[in-house]
Amino acid sequence: MAEHKDIDAADWVDQDLLTREESRDRLDDEIEFERNKLNKLESDSGSADSITMARRRLVAMQNLRDSL
């Protein structure tokens, strides 16, 4: 049987996990990007499918942001 080597959890837990605040900040940036993308699609008469997908993505990110 192979030996199981445990990693030092304190080393990776603090570095690899996002806090809720960090998650909100990152989502805020992505929401702003998606809003700008949607505005551009709408002003440039983008395809209906592209606009629909951008709206869905934006709503999903906003809902997730509100849940944090």
Image (cartoon, rainbow, N blue to C red):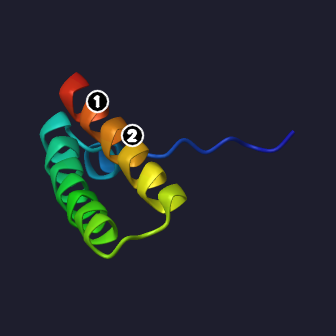
The percent position of residue 5, horizontal first and vertical second, equals 61, 45
The local crowd at label 1, few if under 14, some if 14 to 19, many if 20 or more residues have their Cα within 10 Å, is few
**Label 1, label 2: how many angstroms apart (C-alpha)?**
32 Å
Q: Is residue 59 left or right of residue 36?
A: right
| Residue 37 % position (x, y) | 29, 67
Give amino acid for label 1. Answer: Asn
The residue that appears at 17% across and 47% down in the rendered structure is: 22
Q: How many other residues sit within 10 Å of disc 2, few (<14), some (14-19) or many (≥20)? A: few
Residue at position x 23%, y 48% from top?
Answer: 27
Disc 1 target residue: 63
Where is residue 3? Give x, y as percent: 73, 43
Across and down, in percent, residue 44 comes to 32, 76
Q: From what the image shows, is residue 22 above or below residue 50?
A: above
Query: For the C terminus, which image quadrant?
Result: top left
Q: Residue at x 23, y 64 (%)?
A: 39
Q: Residue at x 36, y 47 (%)?
A: 55
